[in-house]
Amino acid sequence: MRSLVLRLGVPAMVGQAFNLLYSIVDRIFVGRIPQGGEQALAAIGICAPALTAITAFAYMVGIGGASLMGISLGQKNQRRAEQALGNAFWLVVGIAVAVTAVLLPLRRPLLYLLGCSDALYPYASAYFTIYILGTLASLLGVGMNQFLLAQGFARKGMIAVIIGALTNVILDPLLIFGLGLGVRGAAIATVIAQCLMAVYVLFQLCRPEMPVRLRLHRLQGKICRRIIATGSMSFLITLLDNMIIILLNIVLRRYGGEQGDAWITCATVVQSFLTIVFCPSQGITTGCGTLFSYNYGAGNVRKARQSFLWVFVLCGAYIGFLEVAVQLAPGWFAGLFLQDAALLEMASLCLRRYTLALIGVAVQYALVDGLTAMGKVRYAFPISIFRKLVYAVCLLVLPHIGGVESVFYAGSISDFVGAGFSLLMFFAVLWPRLRRELQQMRA
């Protein structure tokens, strides 16, 4: 199992490491625009929750469909595995069209709701509008790539992400600085990159040698409901994460006074660093998701237990390394996005405060994503939601105790408390139930 976790998890982790370049590279180049770079960077931070929420639809269908496909393969049900893939494709297309049609006319009130100011709106509107126009490609690339990973093609999934990421890296400086398009150039580069990724993923899924090929099955209500029910966990988690980011921006604007925009810029730097943490970690859990779903479908208790252990070890090694690195050199990470000396000092302090207990996130990823891959949303949801509730309470309470700068301790407090609660719930309540269920399936 250790070898399987490494074979599936590491390529998926590397792929997601390249995937984070979509947002990180945009922010690095945008932050270096000669005039208005800091404002443009803050504007992208304002847009980020909404854009991540859109991507959550892709993960909802992709993870839900891949889970159903993996369980079906574990039960030797090839036809249902193919139906899961075909129905997921149509779900992604329908959701992408609906999201684009709804958000384009509502972008102005939405951006102000997310904490945008009059000074930031021109930048935020330009980036958001272009990004929304590429929603179909974005959701197809991200959502359908889960089915490559679920069939054990971690390298192909990695290549898909690398194609998009490298395209974005090449086009960003050309469009932002070479053609003088500024923040619009960053959005255009991202959309083009997403289109190329989607084309590659769909091409691979349609190839004859693929064990479960993409065929356009008619929509089946029962299968669609099961896909959404399983994937809704991922969607809700992402949605809640983005609501928390929105709440963070609102709190910083309310208590930050004249420095409200500066604190939001620091929060954007923190969230950018967390992307470096979370994207590869999610790559590990999604790449190894087929181990959880297949062994659950086969009723294999021992291998299911080993899957949790080794996914945690791999996630913990990666996240632990980054926690040590950012505590020792926060200025280096902040300097990737900022040039102003005063902002650089503020952001460095925020990074240190936010990441004191970052290793706790590894516990959440292993347990929540593993249970979700098994289709056990009712088990995964409580241990995920608890950490977010702790974080939200901290955001509301800490400004009254230590001022606006103390808000950034909310991440460390919620990571520590959430990890302890997750371990207690899993070993005392959830695993005994899951073990009995697997033993009954095996019998």
Image (cartoon, rainbow, N blue to C red):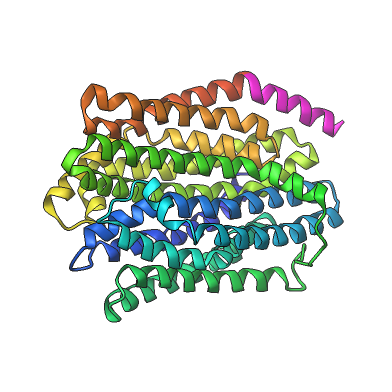
- Foreground pick, 431 / 80: 80
Q: Is residue 78 left or right of residue 97?
A: right
Q: Quadrant of the C terminus?
A: top right
- Foreground pick, 137 / 374: 137
Quick one: which residue is furthest to the bottom in this view? 179
- Foreground pick, 255 / 301: 255
Q: Position of residue 315 (x, y in %)?
A: 48, 43
Q: Is residue 416 left or right of residue 66?
A: left
Residue under the image location 23 percent in, 33 percent down: 404
Q: Quadrant of the N terminus?
A: top right
Q: Position of residue 296 (x, y in %)?
A: 74, 39
Q: Main secondary structure of the magenta part?
A: helix
Magenta stretch holds residue 371: no
38 vs 321: above or below: below
Q: Position of residue 438 (x, y in %)?
A: 77, 31
345 vs 355: above or below: below
391 vs 346: above or below: above
Q: Quadrant of residue 190?
A: bottom left
Count of numbered circles in the view: 0
Magenta stretch holds residue 437: yes
162 vs 360: above or below: below
Q: Is residue 249 left or right of residue 370?
A: left
Quick one: which residue is furthest to the top in this view? 428
Q: Position of residue 116 (x, y in %)?
A: 33, 50
Q: Quadrant of residue 8?
A: bottom right
Question: Which span is picked out in magenta?
Answer: 429-443
Residue under the image location 62 percent in, 68 percent down: 201
Residue under the image location 78 percent in, 42 percent down: 297
Judge whether residue 292 can be spotted in this image.
no
Judge whether residue 7 can be spotted in this image.
yes
